[in-house]
Image: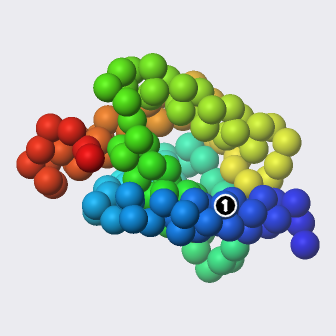
C-alpha cells in the first residue's frame, strides 16, 4: 500500500474518532458539515474546470474530480469543529487553522502524490481559499439556525 493511501486512511480514522468522541457536542453542527462538503465539491469542480489542481492518488479511482477523503470526510469534520469551538476572537482562530491546513497541503504537494497544482495555482491561493471558507461555513451556520453564536 502506498504512503498516500495510508495517509488518507489514517486521516479518515482520525476524523471518525474525533467525531465519535465529540458526537454530543457536534450534533447541532451536522448541517455545517454537509454544507462544507457541498462547498468543497463545488470548489473542486471549479478547480477541475480551470485545471488548478488534481488528485493523482485516490481511494476511489472512479471519482476523478474530487478527493473523497478531503471533501466527504476531512472538510465536513473540520468545519463542524471550527464552528463549534471557535472563540470570540475568530480572526486569530481563522489564521491559526488556515496556516496549519495550508502547511499540511504544502507538504502534501511537495512530498506526496496526494495533490498536484497546475496553471499557476500555488499554496497561497489555497491559503486564501481556506481563510474565506471558514467564514462562509460560519455564516451558513448562523443563517441556518438564525442565531448569532454557536453553542
Seen from the viewer's position, the closer of residues 102 and 97 is 97
Measuring 57% from the left and 60% from the top, which residue is drawn there? 18
Q: Which residue is pictured at 26% across the width and 47% down the height? A: 151
The spot of residue 81 in percent (x, y) is 45, 49
Comparing 22 with 14, the one in front is 22
Q: Secondary structure at mark 1?
A: helix
Q: Residues within 10 Å of mark 1 (few under 14, many from 20)?
A: few
**Is 33 drawn above or below residue 137 in the view shown?**
below
Q: Residue 12, located in which quarter of the rendered image?
A: bottom right
* Number of numbered discs visible in the structure rendering: 1
Q: Quadrant of the N terminus?
A: bottom right
Q: How is the image coloured?
A: rainbow
User: Residue at the spot x=73%, y=68% of the render?
Assistant: 9
The residue singled out by tag 1 in the image is 14
Give the x, y percent position of residue 23.
Answer: 44, 66
Give the image location of residue 67, x and y in percent.
59, 62
Image quadrant in which you'd find residue 136: top left
Q: Can residue 58 be seen by looking at this rendering? A: no
Q: Is residue 96 visible?
A: yes
In the image, taking residue 65 as reference, residue 25 lies left or right, namely left
* Residue 111 horizontal side relative to residue 31, left or right: right
Foreground of the two, 57 or 26: 26
Location of residue 92 by image quarter: top left
Amino acid at each position: 500500500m502506498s504512503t498516500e493511501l495510508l495517509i488518507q486512511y489514517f486521516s479518515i480514522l482520525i476524523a471518525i474518532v474525533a467525531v465519535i468522541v465529540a458526537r454530543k457536542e457536534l450534533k447541532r453542527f451536522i448541517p455545517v458539515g454537509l454544507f462544507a462538503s457541498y462547498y468543497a465539491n463545488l470548489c473542486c469542480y471549479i478547480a477541475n474546470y480551470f485545471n488548478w489542481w488534481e488528485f493523482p492518488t485516490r481511494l476511489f479511482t472512479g471519482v476523478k474530480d474530487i478527493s473523497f477523503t478531503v471533501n466527504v470526510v476531512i472538510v465536513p469534520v473540520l468545519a463542524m469543529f471550527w464552528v463549534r469551538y471557535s472563540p470570540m476572537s475568530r480572526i486569530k482562530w481563522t489564521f491559526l487553522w488556515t496556516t496549519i491546513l495550508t502547511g499540511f497541503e504544502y507538504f502534501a504537494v511537495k512530498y506526496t502524490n496526494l495533490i498536484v497544482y497546475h496553471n499557476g495555482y500555488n499554496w497561497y491561493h489555497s491559503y486564501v481559499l481556506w481563510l474565506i471558507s471558514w467564514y462562509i461555513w460560519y455564516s451558513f451556520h448562523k443563517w441556518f439556525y438564525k442565531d448569532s453564536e454557536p453553542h
